[in-house]
Amino acid sequence: MHVSFDQLPATARVWIYQASRPLTSAETVGLLPTLAQFAEQWTSHGRQLLASAEVLHQHFLVVGLDEGVAGASGCSIDASVHFVAQLEQHLGLELLEKSRLAFLQNGTVGLLDRREMKAAVANGTITADTLYFDNTLADKSELDSHWPRPAGQTWLARYFGAVEKKEGLA
């Protein structure tokens, strides 16, 4: 059963899919009926799920599920991933690729290949205060309050600790 994303409770489970490029306004508007239809038809073991999906920051497809109504099963999660794979083909972009990190700099979402992170920290392009979209968040409350958040407060903190130790040794 589809609900508006803002009507999902703070405890709703979320899955965040990051696009390889920004979606245009026309693409986002065109997706809305498709996202609503998916949420309306999404089921788990024959039970309707209370779900929603939306595009945020032109780069992220976020699927939310109120597990208080009915929880996702392996099959229903597989169905959602299949749906996202279909969107990839339709839009001509990647949503399931996990090797890129997304940062918010000067009001724009920028992508960085994970292998480039050390160099970006070393040259000061990315700092502990740079806003990072941690797409591993588990629920809507985290999405609402900690997304994006300073990279130094996420799993990326280890990159900044290494820089500080090197500077301290110099």
Image (tube, rainbow, N blue to C red):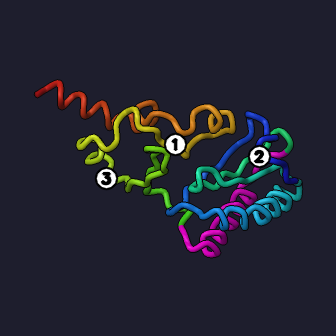
In the drawing, what numbered circle is on residue 134? Answer: 1
Dots 2, 1 in contact, CB < 8 A: no
Left or right: residue 20 versus residue 85 is left
* Residue at image coords 66%, 67%: 27
SS at circle 2: helix
Q: Where residue 64 sits: x, y (%)?
A: 73, 47
> Looking at the rendering, which quadrant does residue 157 occupy?
top left
Left or right: 40 in relation to 22 = right
Amino acid type of the residue tagged 2 in the rendering: Phe
List x then y, in percent, for residue 165.
22, 28
Q: Is residue 19 magenta?
A: no
Residue 5's disc number: 2
**Where residue 154 sits: x, y (%)?**
46, 34
Q: Secondary structure at mark 1?
A: loop
Residue 139: % across, % down: 67, 38
Marks 2 and 3: which is nearer the front? 2
Query: Which three-letter amino acid code belongs to the residue tagged 3?
Result: Glu
Q: Residues within 10 Å of mark 3 (few under 14, many from 20)?
A: few
Q: Which residues are magenta?
A: 70-93
Near-viewer residue (34 or 154) = 34
Mark number displayed over residue 116: 3
Mark found first going from the N terminus, 1 or 3: 3
Identity, as a three-letter code, of the amino acid under mark 1 = Asp
* Residue occupying image coordinates x 72% and y 63%: 29
Q: For the residue carrying disc 2, how many other residues have a C-alpha within 10 Å: few (<14), some (14-19), or many (20+)?
A: some
